[in-house]
Protein backbone atom coordinates (compact mmCIF):
# COMPACT_ATOMS: atom_id res chain seq x y z
CA UNK A 1 0.00 0.00 0.00
CA UNK A 2 2.83 2.35 1.01
CA UNK A 3 4.76 1.46 -2.21
CA UNK A 4 1.68 2.22 -4.32
CA UNK A 5 1.34 5.60 -2.63
CA UNK A 6 5.01 6.43 -3.30
CA UNK A 7 4.54 5.54 -6.98
CA UNK A 8 1.55 7.86 -7.23
CA UNK A 9 3.46 10.69 -5.58
CA UNK A 10 6.44 10.24 -7.90
CA UNK A 11 4.11 10.05 -10.91
CA UNK A 12 2.38 13.23 -9.81
CA UNK A 13 5.69 15.04 -9.40
CA UNK A 14 6.82 13.95 -12.86
CA UNK A 15 3.51 15.04 -14.38
CA UNK A 16 3.68 18.45 -12.71
CA UNK A 17 7.31 18.81 -13.82
CA UNK A 18 6.42 17.94 -17.40
CA UNK A 19 3.50 20.38 -17.45
CA UNK A 20 5.72 23.06 -15.91
CA UNK A 21 8.33 22.53 -18.60
CA UNK A 22 5.74 22.72 -21.39
CA UNK A 23 4.11 25.87 -20.07
CA UNK A 24 7.35 27.53 -18.97
CA UNK A 25 7.68 30.40 -21.49
CA UNK A 26 11.20 29.53 -22.71
CA UNK A 27 10.14 25.94 -23.28
CA UNK A 28 7.11 27.04 -25.26
CA UNK A 29 9.48 29.03 -27.45
CA UNK A 30 11.48 25.92 -28.28
CA UNK A 31 8.38 23.81 -28.82
CA UNK A 32 7.27 26.41 -31.39
CA UNK A 33 10.44 25.92 -33.46
CA UNK A 34 9.49 24.25 -36.77
CA UNK A 35 10.02 20.52 -37.16
CA UNK A 36 11.90 21.17 -40.38
CA UNK A 37 14.37 23.95 -41.15
CA UNK A 38 15.43 24.52 -44.76
CA UNK A 39 18.47 26.61 -45.67
CA UNK A 40 20.55 27.34 -48.74
CA UNK A 41 24.30 26.76 -48.92
CA UNK A 42 26.15 29.53 -47.10
CA UNK A 43 23.14 30.70 -45.09
CA UNK A 44 22.79 30.89 -41.30
CA UNK A 45 19.91 29.98 -39.00
CA UNK A 46 19.80 31.24 -35.42
CA UNK A 47 17.70 30.10 -32.46
CA UNK A 48 17.67 32.55 -29.57
CA UNK A 49 18.19 30.90 -26.21
CA UNK A 50 15.59 31.69 -23.58
CA UNK A 51 16.77 28.86 -21.30
CA UNK A 52 19.94 26.74 -20.84
CA UNK A 53 19.28 24.48 -23.79
CA UNK A 54 21.97 22.40 -25.47
CA UNK A 55 21.94 21.46 -29.15
CA UNK A 56 23.64 18.63 -31.00
CA UNK A 57 23.83 17.61 -34.66
CA UNK A 58 23.50 14.04 -35.85
CA UNK A 59 26.42 14.67 -38.21
CA UNK A 60 28.90 17.48 -38.82
CA UNK A 61 29.35 16.75 -42.53
CA UNK A 62 27.27 19.54 -44.07
CA UNK A 63 26.39 21.91 -41.20
CA UNK A 64 28.37 23.58 -38.43
CA UNK A 65 26.85 24.45 -35.06
CA UNK A 66 27.91 27.15 -32.64
CA UNK A 67 26.49 27.42 -29.12
CA UNK A 68 26.67 30.65 -27.21
CA UNK A 69 24.99 31.82 -24.03
CA UNK A 70 22.16 33.53 -25.88
CA UNK A 71 21.85 31.64 -29.17
CA UNK A 72 22.39 28.48 -31.18
CA UNK A 73 23.66 29.17 -34.71
CA UNK A 74 23.66 26.81 -37.68
CA UNK A 75 25.81 27.42 -40.77
CA UNK A 76 24.92 25.55 -43.98
CA UNK A 77 28.14 24.35 -45.61
CA UNK A 78 26.92 22.05 -48.39
CA UNK A 79 23.77 20.34 -49.59
CA UNK A 80 22.35 17.44 -47.66
CA UNK A 81 20.12 16.49 -44.74
CA UNK A 82 20.81 16.46 -41.01
CA UNK A 83 19.12 16.40 -37.62
CA UNK A 84 19.45 18.70 -34.63
CA UNK A 85 18.39 17.64 -31.12
CA UNK A 86 17.58 20.24 -28.47
CA UNK A 87 17.75 19.19 -24.82
CA UNK A 88 16.85 20.91 -21.56
CA UNK A 89 18.33 19.51 -18.36
CA UNK A 90 19.05 16.28 -20.21
CA UNK A 91 15.45 15.97 -21.43
CA UNK A 92 14.95 16.02 -25.24
CA UNK A 93 12.47 18.77 -26.06
CA UNK A 94 12.75 19.09 -29.83
CA UNK A 95 14.10 17.24 -32.84
CA UNK A 96 14.56 19.38 -35.93
CA UNK A 97 15.19 18.03 -39.44
CA UNK A 98 17.64 20.34 -41.21
CA UNK A 99 17.79 20.42 -45.00
CA UNK A 100 20.47 22.31 -46.92
CA UNK A 101 19.64 23.23 -50.52
CA UNK A 102 21.91 24.25 -53.35
CA UNK A 103 22.77 27.97 -53.41
CA UNK A 104 20.08 29.75 -55.43
CA UNK A 105 19.97 33.32 -56.71
CA UNK A 106 17.81 35.47 -58.97
CA UNK A 107 18.09 39.03 -60.25
CA UNK A 108 15.55 41.37 -58.62
CA UNK A 109 13.32 43.38 -60.95
CA UNK A 110 11.55 46.66 -60.22
CA UNK A 111 11.17 47.69 -63.88
CA UNK A 112 7.83 49.00 -65.11
CA UNK A 113 6.53 46.66 -67.81
CA UNK A 114 3.68 46.74 -70.28
CA UNK A 115 1.60 43.58 -70.48
CA UNK A 116 -0.34 42.28 -73.50
CA UNK A 117 -2.41 39.12 -73.07
CA UNK A 118 -4.16 37.07 -75.74
CA UNK A 119 -6.99 34.90 -74.48
CA UNK A 120 -7.69 31.26 -75.25
CA UNK A 121 -10.58 31.62 -77.71
CA UNK A 122 -12.77 34.71 -77.32
CA UNK A 123 -14.07 35.86 -73.96
CA UNK A 124 -17.73 36.79 -73.54
CA UNK A 125 -17.87 40.09 -71.63
CA UNK A 126 -21.55 40.96 -72.09
CA UNK A 127 -24.87 40.44 -73.87
CA UNK A 128 -26.62 42.82 -76.21
CA UNK A 129 -30.03 42.77 -77.88
CA UNK A 130 -30.23 42.44 -81.66
CA UNK A 131 -32.94 44.66 -83.13
CA UNK A 132 -34.78 42.20 -85.42
CA UNK A 133 -38.06 42.44 -87.30
CA UNK A 134 -39.58 40.30 -84.51
CA UNK A 135 -38.32 42.41 -81.62
CA UNK A 136 -35.11 42.63 -79.63
CA UNK A 137 -33.36 39.38 -78.74
CA UNK A 138 -29.91 38.11 -77.75
CA UNK A 139 -29.09 34.85 -79.59
CA UNK A 140 -26.15 34.27 -77.25
CA UNK A 141 -28.30 34.53 -74.14
CA UNK A 142 -30.92 32.25 -75.72
CA UNK A 143 -28.14 29.69 -76.36
CA UNK A 144 -27.27 29.70 -72.64
CA UNK A 145 -23.98 31.56 -72.93
CA UNK A 146 -23.02 33.58 -69.86
CA UNK A 147 -20.66 36.46 -69.20
CA UNK A 148 -17.22 34.97 -68.49
CA UNK A 149 -17.67 32.03 -70.87
CA UNK A 150 -14.98 31.42 -73.49
CA UNK A 151 -15.89 30.35 -77.03
CA UNK A 152 -13.07 28.06 -78.19
CA UNK A 153 -14.57 26.38 -81.30
CA UNK A 154 -17.18 27.13 -83.95
CA UNK A 155 -18.34 24.32 -86.24
CA UNK A 156 -15.35 22.20 -85.23
CA UNK A 157 -12.78 24.90 -85.98
CA UNK A 158 -10.54 26.49 -83.34
CA UNK A 159 -11.21 30.14 -82.56
CA UNK A 160 -8.16 32.21 -81.64
CA UNK A 161 -9.24 35.84 -82.14
CA UNK A 162 -12.31 37.97 -82.72
CA UNK A 163 -11.76 38.25 -86.46
CA UNK A 164 -12.15 34.46 -86.69
CA UNK A 165 -15.78 34.73 -85.55
CA UNK A 166 -17.42 37.09 -88.07
CA UNK A 167 -17.21 34.88 -91.21
CA UNK A 168 -18.97 32.00 -89.41
CA UNK A 169 -21.69 34.31 -88.11
CA UNK A 170 -22.50 35.83 -91.50
CA UNK A 171 -22.41 32.46 -93.30
CA UNK A 172 -24.72 30.85 -90.73
CA UNK A 173 -27.11 33.78 -90.85
CA UNK A 174 -27.38 33.73 -94.62
CA UNK A 175 -27.93 29.96 -94.71
CA UNK A 176 -30.26 30.17 -91.69
CA UNK A 177 -28.28 27.46 -89.90
CA UNK A 178 -27.21 27.27 -86.27
CA UNK A 179 -23.58 27.50 -85.22
CA UNK A 180 -22.16 24.62 -83.19
CA UNK A 181 -20.13 26.16 -80.36
CA UNK A 182 -17.70 24.66 -77.86
CA UNK A 183 -17.70 26.82 -74.75
CA UNK A 184 -15.43 26.77 -71.67
CA UNK A 185 -16.95 27.73 -68.34
CA UNK A 186 -14.85 27.66 -65.20
CA UNK A 187 -13.16 24.23 -65.28
CA UNK A 188 -15.53 22.50 -67.69
CA UNK A 189 -16.66 22.60 -71.32
CA UNK A 190 -20.03 22.25 -73.02
CA UNK A 191 -21.53 22.49 -76.51
CA UNK A 192 -24.46 24.58 -77.60
CA UNK A 193 -26.19 25.75 -80.77
CA UNK A 194 -26.54 29.44 -81.56
CA UNK A 195 -28.55 30.88 -84.43
CA UNK A 196 -27.37 34.39 -85.44
CA UNK A 197 -30.11 36.99 -85.95
CA UNK A 198 -30.23 39.77 -88.51
CA UNK A 199 -30.02 43.34 -87.23
CA UNK A 200 -32.58 45.23 -89.31
CA UNK A 201 -30.77 48.52 -88.82
CA UNK A 202 -27.33 47.34 -89.93
CA UNK A 203 -28.39 44.50 -92.25
CA UNK A 204 -25.82 42.12 -90.71
CA UNK A 205 -26.12 38.99 -88.59
CA UNK A 206 -25.11 39.10 -84.94
CA UNK A 207 -24.51 36.82 -81.95
CA UNK A 208 -25.94 39.18 -79.36
CA UNK A 209 -22.65 38.95 -77.44
CA UNK A 210 -19.82 41.33 -76.61
CA UNK A 211 -16.54 39.47 -77.00
CA UNK A 212 -12.88 40.21 -76.42
CA UNK A 213 -9.66 38.39 -77.34
CA UNK A 214 -6.97 40.42 -75.57
CA UNK A 215 -6.15 42.64 -72.61
CA UNK A 216 -3.40 45.11 -71.79
CA UNK A 217 -2.04 46.85 -68.73
CA UNK A 218 1.07 47.68 -66.74
CA UNK A 219 2.83 46.13 -63.78
CA UNK A 220 6.23 45.58 -62.22
CA UNK A 221 8.88 42.93 -62.85
CA UNK A 222 9.69 40.85 -59.75
CA UNK A 223 12.59 38.56 -60.65
CA UNK A 224 14.67 37.18 -63.50
CA UNK A 225 16.33 33.76 -63.31
CA UNK A 226 19.68 34.36 -65.07
CA UNK A 227 20.27 30.75 -66.13
CA UNK A 228 16.89 30.02 -67.73
CA UNK A 229 15.77 33.62 -68.49
CA UNK A 230 12.46 32.78 -66.83
CA UNK A 231 10.80 35.69 -65.05
CA UNK A 232 7.92 36.45 -62.72
CA UNK A 233 5.96 39.69 -62.42
CA UNK A 234 2.88 41.32 -60.80
CA UNK A 235 2.45 38.79 -57.99
CA UNK A 236 -1.28 38.39 -58.67
CA UNK A 237 -3.59 37.20 -61.42
CA UNK A 238 -4.77 39.49 -64.23
CA UNK A 239 -8.57 39.50 -64.40
CA UNK A 240 -10.83 40.82 -67.13
CA UNK A 241 -12.05 44.33 -66.33
CA UNK A 242 -15.69 43.46 -67.12
CA UNK A 243 -16.16 39.88 -65.97
CA UNK A 244 -13.71 40.19 -63.02
CA UNK A 245 -12.63 36.64 -63.82
CA UNK A 246 -9.01 35.53 -64.38
CA UNK A 247 -8.01 35.70 -68.03
CA UNK A 248 -7.21 32.29 -69.51
CA UNK A 249 -4.05 33.00 -71.50
CA UNK A 250 -3.20 31.57 -74.89
CA UNK A 251 -0.03 33.65 -75.05
CA UNK A 252 1.15 37.17 -74.44
CA UNK A 253 4.04 39.60 -74.52
CA UNK A 254 5.77 42.05 -72.21
CA UNK A 255 7.32 45.32 -73.34
CA UNK A 256 9.16 48.14 -71.58
CA UNK A 257 6.93 50.76 -70.00
CA UNK A 258 7.37 54.38 -68.91
CA UNK A 259 5.55 55.92 -65.93
CA UNK A 260 4.17 59.31 -67.00
CA UNK A 261 2.44 60.39 -63.77
CA UNK A 262 1.03 59.17 -60.46
CA UNK A 263 -2.50 59.47 -59.12
CA UNK A 264 -1.82 59.68 -55.40
CA UNK A 265 -3.74 57.29 -53.17
CA UNK A 266 -5.79 58.17 -50.10
CA UNK A 267 -8.04 56.31 -47.66
CA UNK A 268 -10.85 54.67 -49.64
CA UNK A 269 -9.33 55.67 -52.97
CA UNK A 270 -6.25 53.67 -54.06
CA UNK A 271 -3.90 55.56 -56.34
CA UNK A 272 -2.50 54.47 -59.69
CA UNK A 273 0.60 54.63 -61.84
CA UNK A 274 -0.24 56.14 -65.21
CA UNK A 275 2.08 54.70 -67.81
CA UNK A 276 2.50 54.07 -71.50
CA UNK A 277 4.26 51.39 -73.47
CA UNK A 278 7.72 52.49 -74.59
CA UNK A 279 7.85 54.09 -78.02
CA UNK A 280 9.72 51.22 -79.66
CA UNK A 281 7.19 48.68 -78.28
CA UNK A 282 9.95 46.10 -78.53
CA UNK A 283 8.84 42.73 -77.17
CA UNK A 284 11.25 41.73 -74.39
CA UNK A 285 9.56 38.48 -73.36
CA UNK A 286 6.58 36.18 -73.70
CA UNK A 287 3.78 35.29 -71.27
CA UNK A 288 2.79 31.65 -70.90
CA UNK A 289 1.01 31.71 -67.54
CA UNK A 290 -1.44 34.00 -65.74
CA UNK A 291 -1.95 32.65 -62.23
CA UNK A 292 -2.91 33.82 -58.72
CA UNK A 293 0.83 34.35 -58.14
CA UNK A 294 1.43 36.60 -61.16
CA UNK A 295 2.39 36.34 -64.80
CA UNK A 296 5.27 34.17 -65.95
CA UNK A 297 7.24 33.53 -69.10
CA UNK A 298 10.67 33.87 -70.64
CA UNK A 299 12.72 36.91 -71.63
CA UNK A 300 14.32 37.27 -75.04
CA UNK A 301 16.03 40.59 -74.25
CA UNK A 302 18.14 41.81 -71.34
CA UNK A 303 16.14 43.85 -68.84
CA UNK A 304 18.40 45.64 -66.34
CA UNK A 305 17.14 47.73 -63.43
CA UNK A 306 20.29 49.83 -63.09
CA UNK A 307 20.70 49.54 -59.31
CA UNK A 308 20.67 45.82 -58.45
CA UNK A 309 21.60 43.87 -61.55
CA UNK A 310 23.51 41.08 -59.81
CA UNK A 311 21.77 37.92 -58.59
CA UNK A 312 20.65 37.91 -54.94
CA UNK A 313 19.94 34.95 -52.67
CA UNK A 314 16.32 34.37 -51.73
CA UNK A 315 14.59 33.82 -48.40
CA UNK A 316 12.07 31.02 -47.90
CA UNK A 317 8.81 31.92 -46.17
CA UNK A 318 10.03 30.84 -42.72
CA UNK A 319 13.17 32.97 -43.08
CA UNK A 320 11.33 36.27 -43.55
CA UNK A 321 11.36 38.43 -40.41
CA UNK A 322 9.27 41.32 -39.17
CA UNK A 323 11.19 44.57 -39.48
CA UNK A 324 12.80 46.86 -42.07
CA UNK A 325 12.99 45.96 -45.75
CA UNK A 326 13.15 47.69 -49.14
CA UNK A 327 11.18 47.59 -52.36
CA UNK A 328 12.30 48.36 -55.91
CA UNK A 329 9.84 50.18 -58.15
CA UNK A 330 9.43 52.98 -60.71
CA UNK A 331 7.58 56.22 -59.93
CA UNK A 332 9.08 58.44 -62.63
CA UNK A 333 9.84 57.65 -66.27
CA UNK A 334 11.68 54.29 -66.33
CA UNK A 335 14.05 54.82 -63.38
CA UNK A 336 14.03 52.00 -60.81
CA UNK A 337 14.45 53.33 -57.27
CA UNK A 338 14.82 51.81 -53.81
CA UNK A 339 12.35 52.69 -51.03
CA UNK A 340 12.06 51.75 -47.35
CA UNK A 341 9.21 49.58 -46.08
CA UNK A 342 8.39 47.65 -42.92
CA UNK A 343 7.39 43.98 -42.75
CA UNK A 344 4.54 44.30 -40.24
CA UNK A 345 3.76 40.59 -40.13
CA UNK A 346 4.81 37.45 -41.98
CA UNK A 347 3.40 33.94 -42.11
CA UNK A 348 5.70 30.92 -42.52
CA UNK A 349 3.83 28.80 -45.07
CA UNK A 350 4.17 25.11 -45.89
CA UNK A 351 1.97 25.41 -48.97
CA UNK A 352 1.61 28.12 -51.64
CA UNK A 353 -0.60 31.05 -50.63
CA UNK A 354 -1.04 34.47 -52.21
CA UNK A 355 -1.02 36.46 -48.96
CA UNK A 356 2.18 35.81 -47.02
CA UNK A 357 3.06 39.10 -45.40
CA UNK A 358 1.72 42.54 -44.54
CA UNK A 359 3.95 45.45 -45.51
CA UNK A 360 3.85 49.16 -44.73
CA UNK A 361 5.48 51.92 -46.75
CA UNK A 362 7.71 54.01 -44.46
CA UNK A 363 9.79 55.94 -46.99
CA UNK A 364 8.87 59.67 -46.80
CA UNK A 365 9.75 60.24 -50.46
CA UNK A 366 7.48 57.44 -51.69
CA UNK A 367 4.64 58.46 -49.35
CA UNK A 368 4.85 62.02 -50.65
CA UNK A 369 4.85 60.86 -54.29
CA UNK A 370 2.25 58.07 -54.21
CA UNK A 371 0.55 58.06 -50.81
CA UNK A 372 1.67 54.45 -50.37
CA UNK A 373 0.97 51.40 -52.52
CA UNK A 374 -0.73 52.20 -55.84
CA UNK A 375 -2.03 50.18 -58.77
CA UNK A 376 0.83 49.32 -61.10
CA UNK A 377 3.18 48.75 -58.17
CA UNK A 378 2.15 45.08 -57.96
CA UNK A 379 5.17 42.86 -58.46
CA UNK A 380 7.66 45.30 -56.92
CA UNK A 381 10.35 43.08 -55.36
CA UNK A 382 10.80 43.16 -51.57
CA UNK A 383 14.37 42.82 -50.30
CA UNK A 384 15.40 42.15 -46.70
CA UNK A 385 18.94 41.67 -45.38
CA UNK A 386 20.30 41.31 -48.90
CA UNK A 387 17.79 38.61 -49.89
CA UNK A 388 14.79 38.72 -52.22
CA UNK A 389 11.84 37.73 -50.03
CA UNK A 390 8.71 38.48 -52.06
CA UNK A 391 6.65 40.99 -54.02
CA UNK A 392 4.06 43.66 -53.34
CA UNK A 393 0.62 42.43 -54.45
CA UNK A 394 -2.34 44.36 -53.00
CA UNK A 395 -3.10 47.65 -51.28
CA UNK A 396 -5.44 48.05 -48.31
CA UNK A 397 -8.21 50.31 -49.63
CA UNK A 398 -8.74 52.03 -46.26
CA UNK A 399 -4.99 52.41 -45.63
CA UNK A 400 -3.00 52.85 -48.85
CA UNK A 401 0.27 52.96 -46.89
CA UNK A 402 -0.13 49.22 -46.26
CA UNK A 403 -0.89 46.07 -48.20
CA UNK A 404 -0.11 42.43 -48.82
CA UNK A 405 2.94 40.72 -50.21
CA UNK A 406 3.51 37.22 -51.58
CA UNK A 407 6.54 35.11 -50.65
CA UNK A 408 9.08 34.74 -53.47
CA UNK A 409 9.18 30.98 -52.82
CA UNK A 410 5.71 30.56 -54.33
CA UNK A 411 6.34 32.79 -57.34
CA UNK A 412 9.44 30.78 -58.23
CA UNK A 413 7.46 27.57 -57.84
CA UNK A 414 4.78 28.92 -60.18
CA UNK A 415 7.45 29.86 -62.74
CA UNK A 416 8.51 26.21 -62.90
CA UNK A 417 11.86 26.86 -61.21
CA UNK A 418 12.94 24.12 -58.80
CA UNK A 419 14.62 25.75 -55.81
CA UNK A 420 14.46 22.56 -53.72
CA UNK A 421 16.92 20.62 -55.87
CA UNK A 422 19.39 18.45 -53.97
CA UNK A 423 22.10 16.16 -55.38
CA UNK A 424 21.02 12.53 -55.50
CA UNK A 425 22.41 10.15 -52.89
CA UNK A 426 23.77 13.04 -50.86
CA UNK A 427 22.59 12.90 -47.29
CA UNK A 428 24.37 12.97 -43.98
Image (cartoon, rainbow, N blue to C red):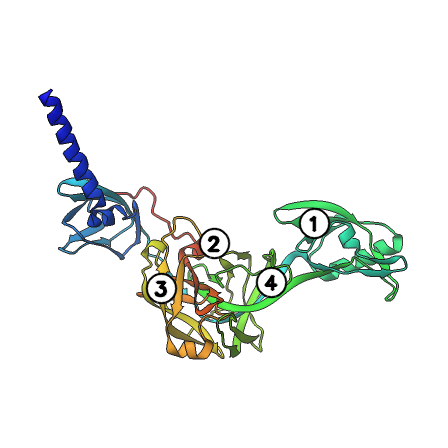
For label 1, the SS is strand
The residue furthest right is 133
Q: Is residue 87 above or below residue 379?
A: above
* Label located before the other in sequence (3 or 4): 4
Residue 343 image label: 3
Q: Which mark is residue 183?
A: 1
Secondary structure beneath label 3: strand
Q: What's the distance in space between the residues labelled 3 and 4, CA to CA?
A: 32 Å
Seen from the viewer's position, the closer of residues 299 and 218 is 218
- Select label 3 or label 4 by which is in front: 3
Question: Who's the residue at 82% across and 55% down the image?
Answer: 196
The quadrant the C terminus occupies is top left
Would residue 159 be found to the left or right of residue 196 on screen?
left
Badge 4 or badge 2: first in the primary sequence: 4
Question: Where is residue 392 shown, x and y percent of the image?
Answer: 44, 65
Q: Which mark is residue 425?
A: none
* CA separation in Å, label 1 and label 3: 44 Å
Amino acid sequence: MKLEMIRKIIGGILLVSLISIIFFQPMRQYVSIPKTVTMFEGQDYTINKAAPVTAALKSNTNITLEQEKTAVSLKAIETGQNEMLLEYAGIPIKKVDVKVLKDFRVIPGGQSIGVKLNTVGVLVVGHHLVNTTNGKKSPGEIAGIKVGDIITEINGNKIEKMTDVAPYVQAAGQSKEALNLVVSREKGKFTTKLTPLKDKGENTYKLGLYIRDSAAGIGTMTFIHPQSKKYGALGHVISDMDTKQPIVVEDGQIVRSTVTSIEKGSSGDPGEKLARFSNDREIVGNINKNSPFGIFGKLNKDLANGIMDKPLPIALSHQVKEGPAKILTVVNNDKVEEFNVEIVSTIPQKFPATKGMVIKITDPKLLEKTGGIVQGMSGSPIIQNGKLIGAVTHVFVNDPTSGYGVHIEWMLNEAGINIYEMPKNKAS
